[in-house]
Image (tube, coloured by chain):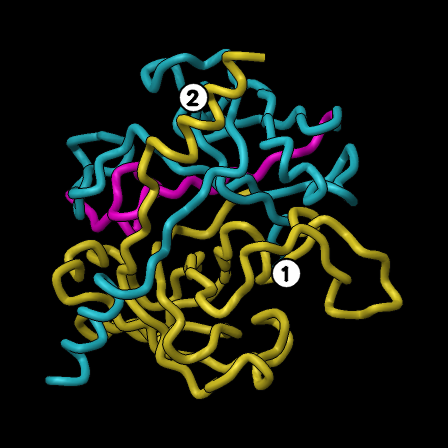
Chain colours: A cyan, B yellow
Amino acid sequence: MKPRRKTWRAMYDGKRAQLRPIGVIRSSIKKPSEAPRQGSEGAPDAWLEINPLLSEGLDGLVVGDQVIVVTWLHLARRNVLKVHPRSDTSRPLTGVFATRSPDRPNPLGLHPVTVHEVANNRLRIGPIEAVDGTPVVDIKPALRG
Amino acid sequence: MKPRRKTWRAMYDGKRAQLRPIGVIRSSIKKPSEAPRQGSEGAPDAWLEINPLLSEGLDGLVVGDQVIVVTWLHLARRNVLKVHPRSDTSRPLTGVFATRSPDRPNPLGLHPVTVHEVANNRLRIGPIEAVDGTPVVDIKPALRG
């Protein structure tokens, strides 16, 4: 038991895994109640505004690229381990790691989007269901396979 | 200019986006030099050991599920904005957000894997290129296009 307990303590207290937002979503969706549950369910396009100090990191991204925008869902609850999928109480309580609920210990959002425009440190992307002001923490090429 | 500067300051200093590892990768890959660059490039299966306090969050995950494991690439460098893709110096320097380099401001790894076994708070998953000891911060159902 000892090594395992030591591991968990070290992971929680020791290593700092502090996210630094690289950008922010500028969207017409102003509150969660206006947002579809997934980008593919009628979400609009939005601007992703990157910290100008980091804009070099965008070099190579071009219009038409499929990327995954990783957000920090700052309005989510972190102390939830089970939810009714899609808030449908007729569906059984399910572990958050088997769902796309924003409520989860680390409320990261993964948004597969297309790049529609690149303008200095701003990208026009979509469709994306994230609300205006959502911090962005990473951008990656779309997953294959 | 004022609102924009205020935004960046608020995002960096104010909101805490502190990740709390939910688990750890137990792999036969012991150092980065042994790891393939992508899971699909000959990586092994591995165990994902979840903090027992959070194992409720796994309810509903079953063998055969396709999930995305999100890791914190704790060995990566955070102060890098451009890299040669795949460390191939014949390829031009490219912004990290257009690549899958582990080196990036927030070194998050996205690993699409299959669940091969569920044993209490441990999942057998793969293929996955993450090294032994890599902290896991989230698990999500696979993205649909």
Residue A134 in the figure: left or right of residue B84: left
Instruction: Locate residue B42: give its quadrant.
Output: bottom right
* Distance from Cα at disc 2 to Cα at disc 1: 28 Å
Residue B108 at x, y = what percent?
A: 48, 55
Q: Amino acid at mark 1?
A: Ser
Instruction: Locate residue A50: give its quadrant.
Output: top right
Q: Is residue B140 visible?
A: yes
Q: Which residue is mark 2?
A: A131
The disc at residue B101 is 1
**Which stretch did the figure color magenta?**
A93-117
Q: Element at badge 2?
A: loop
Residue A8 at x, y = what percent?
A: 20, 70
Q: Quadrant of the N terminus of chain B?
A: top right
- Circle 1 chain: B
Q: Element at badge 1?
A: loop
The vertical placement of B33 against B1, above or below, is: below
Q: Amino acid at mark 2?
A: Val
Q: Is residue B139 visible?
A: no
